[in-house]
Image (spheres, helix red, strand yellow):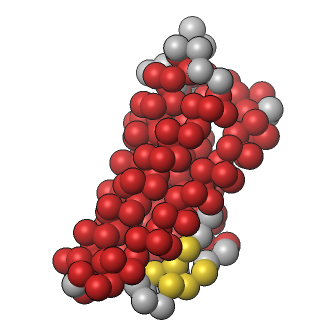
Amino acid sequence: MIVMNQTKKLVYTALFTALCCVGTMVIQIPTPATHGYIHLGDAFVILSGVILGKKYGSLAAGIGSAFADIFSGYAYYAPTTFVVKFMVALCAAVLYKALTSHGVKELIAMIPCGLADILFVVAGYFLHSYFTEGIGPALLSVPSNAIQGCSGLIVAAILLPILTAVPDIKKAKLCMNHE
């Protein structure tokens, strides 16, 4: 079993926190009907769970994504975003580990991770909009959040082999997913 010291775990968690934040902020396509935006940050949310595992990946995804909302002027979404992205990364970590430990290829194992992303993002922001703005805006949020989840899956599937080609990231993935 590969062992990694606590400092390296925290550094990788900080790195993926920053990736989730920046990935969310770099390209933002506003959705006026929902007062939100579509972004590519979900790719890094999924990758946080897959590479860092349940504990560290979930925290990186939740904190990084919530910071992106705060820094982008969408602070009213930050609490919901923290919970939604935490849950996406947690599910991605659990699903990915379970599937790959049973011999499923890495890229195929990413598909259920992306589906979990779509489910949690659509449901989480639907509930947020329903309770804050009503049923109309909640229903309007569904298509844009589904698109965001699909794009997150595609980008995560493209980036996973690239990131795991880096020896230290590959080691982190092997170590942190077995805790």
The image position of residue 37, as x and y in percent, is: 52, 79
Q: Residue at x 77, y 28 (%)?
A: 167
Q: Is residue 62 left or right of residue 132?
A: right
Q: Nearer the viewer, residue 160 or 168?
A: 160
Image height check: is 128 above or below 61? below
Judge whether residue 78 can be spotted in this image.
Answer: no
In the rendered image, the quadrant that contains the C terminus is top left
Q: Nearer the viewer, residue 174 or 156?
A: 156
The image position of residue 139, as x and y in percent, is: 33, 77
Judge whether residue 139 can be spotted in this image.
Answer: yes
Image height check: is 124 above or below 104? below
Q: Is residue 173 left or right of residue 159?
A: left
Q: Is residue 6 left or right of residue 119?
A: right
Q: Residue at x 62, y 64 (%)?
A: 40
Q: Residue at x 39, y 63 (%)?
A: 122
> Seen from this angle, which residue lies furthest top?
1
Q: Residue at x 49, y 64 (%)?
A: 146
Image height check: is 48 above or below 129? above
